[in-house]
Image: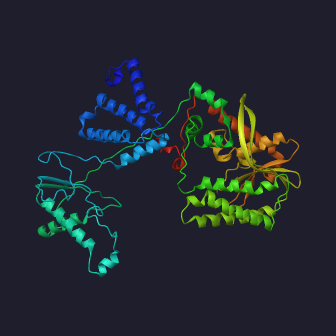
Amino acid sequence: MHNIGIDLEEAECKESLKTLHNLFLRIWEENDNLAKFSSSLKLLLDALVNNGMLTNFPFNLKIIEKLEEIKIELESLSFNQELFERSEIWDIFQQKLQEEVVSFIGSPLKGTQILGFLEARSLCFENVIIMDVNESILPTLKINEPLIPREVMLSLGLSRLEKEEEIQRYQFNSLISAAAKVYLVYEKNEVKEKSRFIEELLWKMQKESNSLEVTTMPRASFYINVMPQTVSIYKTTENIDFIKKATYSASRINTYMNCPLQFYYQYVLGLEEKDDLLGEPEAPHIGDFIHELLEEAFIKFKNTAPLLDKKFEKYFFEKMEEKFENDLGRRMKTDSFLLKRIIKNRLERFLDSERKRDVAKIICLEERRKDTITINNEEISFVYTVDRMDQMQDESIIIIDYKTGGANVSPKKLSALEKMNMDIDSIREDIKSFQLPLYYYFVSRQLPDKNVNAQLYNLRTLERKSLISESDLPHKGRIMEICFKALEVIFREIFDPGTGFMPSKEERKCEFCGFSALCSNT
């Protein structure tokens, strides 16, 4: 701390950090009612006032006053001892904050005054600064009337827009005509233009001087050079021990390939993106809906050949209608019928495609399994869920992974894998996902006498993409060897204490990441 001019010993620094941690984190953990929350808020406000520099700026004191008022209101509520979820308490507090307004209050006889046009009526000032003198802000006109449609007003000979504009023009001209100096500040860019009031002043000046060049507009600009920051979370001994003992899945490995920092937030810290149950269903919700529907409808064919006749088709779509209304329809607006029709159309095509497959029996549906792999002398636990496993008429086994999206996440053919560099970027580009290789490995080990293949079944296009193509069947051992070498590279990096958790290099993926607010890479 001596390098920045602060005389603070290490022990004092630790104590200060401990105090800050207590004030901003620990005291809020046990707040299960509004009374406890108010007490925590009081401790924080007292510390800020007594130990901070808030008193140096009047606005800060006004903010503290508002927070004190909120605290008093919360602690005086008759139900302040009722139990709430912590998130609900913070929602109440946030809602109260959004309702508050901190006004700039000064002396009416000296200093700076911040006023609106109505407040400045009949007042004269030596210096006037008007901000945001942009079109659509000044004048501010409401096209739609709250009670009477504009067409009706015009037919009656009433035009509120023109009258409102004249009122604001009069207030504007009255304010600037009585001032010695006037500064009109506006923003000019591709979407914003100066107000018509400024244009009228310029036109008046041009007519009086009989010249177009009557004034020069001074421009104010601020050049900001944002230096990109690279977040890197360094691994501690505890981190390494934790991730070595963790249970992995194909999706965890895929997450690390796409963004190690997201892997850290999601699987090391255990953070989860909050699901908005009141919001519109998104792609993951629709995918879950289809997976669950196929499991519930096809479970009757487990250990037997599926009979997809008219009776089953009727049962299937009745079940789809009922499940859609319960799971998705109630969360959607009037366009739910469109989504339902799209899903039904795709499932109709899916059933037609299924009738053409020579399935002898369905072995399992949405079955969760556990297994282990030894990589780099480390035994790693894995968990995986098989969407569906079929035994075909030729007794071969097909592991099916349903996909409701359009992205191709199956590894490339052997010819491309042979040329792959053993680094994370190349592995992500050529293997794309370890889901099929891991499914194939685990099931092949359990059924060594069977001809096994893993397959992506795209429910949108009905394309079935096999891990091992017909041409690569003689070389399936080589394909799995390359996939395992790539998996070794990934786990070597995950377990390496010298390699931190870095953000993804593909910024387009950050737009859809639930942890982007924690990452300065975005």
Question: Which percent across, then down, holds residue 327?
Answer: 62, 56
Quadrant in which the N terminus is drawn: top left
How many numbered badges does the structure rendering display?
0
Is residue 83 in view from this perspective?
Answer: yes
Above or below, comparing residue 93 to residue 25 in the picture: below
Q: Which one is nearer the viewer's eye here, 222 or 368?
A: 368
Question: Which percent across, then down, holds residue 180?
Answer: 10, 55
Above or below, comparing residue 242 to residue 417 in the picture: above
Left or right of 46 on screen, residue 406? right
- Identify the residue at image location x=67%, y=50%: 409
Left or right of 167 on screen, residue 522? right
Question: Which percent across, then down, holds residue 197?
Answer: 22, 65
Question: Which percent across, then down, holds residue 193?
Answer: 30, 62
Q: Residue furthest front?
A: 78
Q: Which one is nearer the viewer's eye here, 306 or 35?
A: 35
Left or right of 179 on screen, residue 86? right
Q: Which one is nearer the viewer's eye here, 128 or 504?
A: 128
Left or right of 245 on screen, residue 184? left
For the rendered model, the colour scheme is rainbow
- Identify the residue at image location x=71%, y=32%: 380
Is residue 478 in view from this perspective?
Answer: no
- Identify the residue at image location x=37%, y=38%: 75
Above or below, comparing residue 155 to residue 518 in the picture: below
